Amino acid sequence: MALRLPERVPGLPVLALVLLLLPLFLGNEFHLDIATQIALIAATVVGLNLLVGYGGQVSLGHAAFFGMGAYASAILTGTYGWTSIPALLCGALLVAVLAWTLGRPILRLKGHYLSMATLGMGIIIAIVINNEGWLTGGPDGLAVEPLTVLGAELSIFDHYSLLGLEVSGAMLWYGLAALLLLLAVWIAQNLVDSPIGRALRAVHGSEVAARVVGVDTSHYKLLIFVISAVYASVMGSFYAHYTGFITPQVASFEHSIELITMVVLGGMASTYGVILGAVLLMLLPQLLTDFQDYEMMMFGLILMLTMIFMPKGLLPTLSEAVRRLRPRPATTPASGQE
Amino acid sequence: MNQNVQQTETSRDDTARLTPLLEVRGLGKAFGGVHAVDDLSFRILPGEVYAVIGPNGAGKTTLFNLITGLYQPDQGEISLKGEAVQGLPPERLARLGMSRTFQNLQICMNMTALENVMLGRHLHLKRNFLAALLRWPSLRASERTCRAQAEELIRFVGCGDYVDADAAAMPYGALKRLEIARALATQPSILLLDEPAAGLNSTETAALEQLIRKVAAGGITVVLVEHDMKLVMSISDRVLVLDYGRKLAEGTPREIRDNPDVIAAYLGG
Amino acid sequence: MFAEFLQYLFSGVTIGATYALVALGFTLVYNASHVINFAQGEFLMIGGMSTVSLLAMGVPLPLAIAMAVALAAVLGVALHKLAIAPARKADVITLIIITIGASIFLRGLAQIIWGKEFHAMPSFSATESVNVLGAVMYTQSLWVLAVAGVLVLLLALFFTRTLMGKAILATSMNPGAARLMGIRTQFVLMLAFMLAAVLGAMAGIMVAPVTLTAYDIGIMLGLKGFVAAAIGGMGSGVGAVVGGLLLGIAEAMTAGYISSDYKDAVAFLLILVILFFMPRGLFGARVAERV
């Protein structure tokens, strides 16, 4: 069932407002830090949702693209002295080329074979990052230079004056992450609302139907695979600059699973749903730290229960419930059939 | 092809004389040794309503899947408007003006009725990637036109009540017509309908008959696989009878009705 | 030179037999329910870890093994009853996430009970190793091979000779028809999960003396088993065994001749290459898509 209830609300301004007001409620720098990380990961997941939620193509290896973006930025700025933006673009280009090359054979596969292949691709990339220590620092990780924009360095440890106001670097980073998330959502929604997005959703709905009306389905699958990979790469670059230190964990299988879990948990093919998924999945470990040893078990349990009782994901299930509470207009054609 | 579009009355002589819109020669397809379609040849003229009938398992749907590129033929040729098209994928055939519906519906249940039909306009839309990414005004205008055309088609097939309904919430009969609307949205020169009346009640079938007549009157060649003999006999210009993947008979509805082989196959089958 | 090759072959076949058992578990569950059970690897961990604990408590080895396997079987049934059956109408990807949730849950549980450190299990035989043509063969490898062989044989007999086995096959081919024929498909599904858990636990117990065991060994072993099953073509029993052995040998040869750093990459490289050329694995059915 297409979920349009939340999409009909002017979602983007609401999201912008939430992101704008959020810092007022965040008590300290630690909360701000979590919010910044969530925004960057949420933007990644909005891209992944284009592939998984709208296109119906499973990727169990997307963290590899995130990791490649992160490492490309770290290595090009650190080892080779590039500035941030060219490094980020170079990383994105690299990822695009790789995703395009690997995507062609991979996306011919269906179902579990597709899961298997994307999983394999992701793990191989993670192993390479782990093993090629001369370039990546290996399992010990790699320090990353702060982000430089137009010659100015953006560090979370500094303070800046902006329009006469004293603003902390952490707050500026939060603002940047929020802007990136809004941009990610805007682009994703534009794409979904276009003929390209329709073709993509048709690939999910009925690939045969899409083909007989002239949709070159393999072309669109590949296109969206590359787009979602570039989303991950760009956000990986920002993430690396933000955290200042990365380990192969960013590209790992576990991270890939986290990303796709955010999509499924929040609600596939619902842009705001997957953002909710990212928020919850990243807050959960924070909330569970009190359980210490039981953290992992609780996490698994919550994940399992949510998916069993809300197989369509959180937001679609919630908005379905809201829709049921509201009395239906009597003339809705969808309600008066059979 | 245009000079032939007005031809609605066809006879044996025309079949030989006119350039066929679709021609099938020596077509064959086997699955694990079973010949689903075997050495089959026929020609379909522009503007005619051509029905394919036969008992279950006679190879009708396989034939449709071969013509529309979903299956690769083992041997034989298919030409559309004089161009060899066997082995081309469905998305290429759509560009050449071929469209179809399915016996077991192929509707995108994750979309609305309107979106399903707008999907049918795919080939006729601007699909510039950057324009889509940045929501350029030209793209928005083209989407508005597309929406209007799709709405009109939905009304044309008689689903006007369901324009904004989720496909998943629509009744079966409406979905069958929605599929025709989507096929028409591609502006085909040839439309293949696979059991359009299956599962419909008599009122719905009557409405379907009117719809097919309207489509054919618009100059679109219609090929249909159908079990409902009353429908077939009333709207077809010519009928092809398949049995075990082979041609048992071909001719006008009257000729088919009187053909002893056909009677034997149906009564003895 | 040859001794070296033989050495790699021994270790490859040993680990390969383990993969084969995991892959068979995947195949069983996949055939019965079309679910890819990402928690399959955890049964190896449960089997190995509980045996280690029971041995430490002074339980004799055969009894310890039986109890560990029984525990895994119960968990397998519980996984089906509590997690898979309630969600059987969900999307493939949702089911994948559920089994991943189950796997994280079991790993978390194991971490609480057994901690994060590695646990060693003694070899089953007093003699640790024998010399074969200059290569060292661990007696435990023989145990792994023998047990795997017997299990595969039993499984083959089960599917060809018993009514229950045939019922599982029937359910995998056509659940609707099987139900009409009076087969209780839910029971069959449960049985498949239980058998898969037993296979996994046995593999985990047998291989523990060779590789050590820890709360998180299930991830990689499970993924490798999944790869082995996919190499063979999901759903083919013979394919799973061949895929497992092939994978084990390829890994051992890579570790020996190329680089042990890239040992874990072999499985995934292999599966990519195979899927690129044979999109349904080595033994997968080639069916025309019906529309």
Image (cartoon, rainbow, N blue to C red):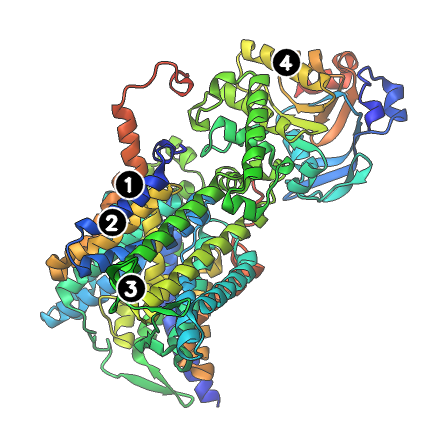
Please, which chain is the residue tagged with disc 2 on?
A
Q: Chain of mark 4?
A: B
Q: Chain of mark 3?
A: C
Whether discs 2 and 4 lie on one chain: the answer is no
Residue A12 visible from this viewpoint: yes
**Which amino acid, mark 2?**
Leu
Q: Indicate which label's residue lies in the foreground, 3 or 1.
A: 1
Residue that label 1 marks: A314
How far apart marks 3 and 1 lie (CA) works out to 29 Å
Secondary element at image label 3: helix
Amino acid carrying mark 1 in the image: Leu
* Residue matched to label 3: C218
Q: Which residue is mark 4?
A: B209
Q: Which callout, 2 or 4, points to the residue nearer the camera?
A: 2
Q: Are marks 2 and 3 in contact (CB under 8 Å)?
A: no
C91 or C78: nearer the viewer: C91
**Label 1–label 4 contact, CB within 8 A:** no
The chain to which mark 1 is attached is A
Q: Secondary structure at mark 1?
A: helix
Disc 1 crowd, CA 10 A, few/some/many (<14, 14-19, 20+): many
Drawn side of residue B176 relative to residue B62, left or right: left
Q: Of discs 1 and 4, which sits in the foreground?
A: 1
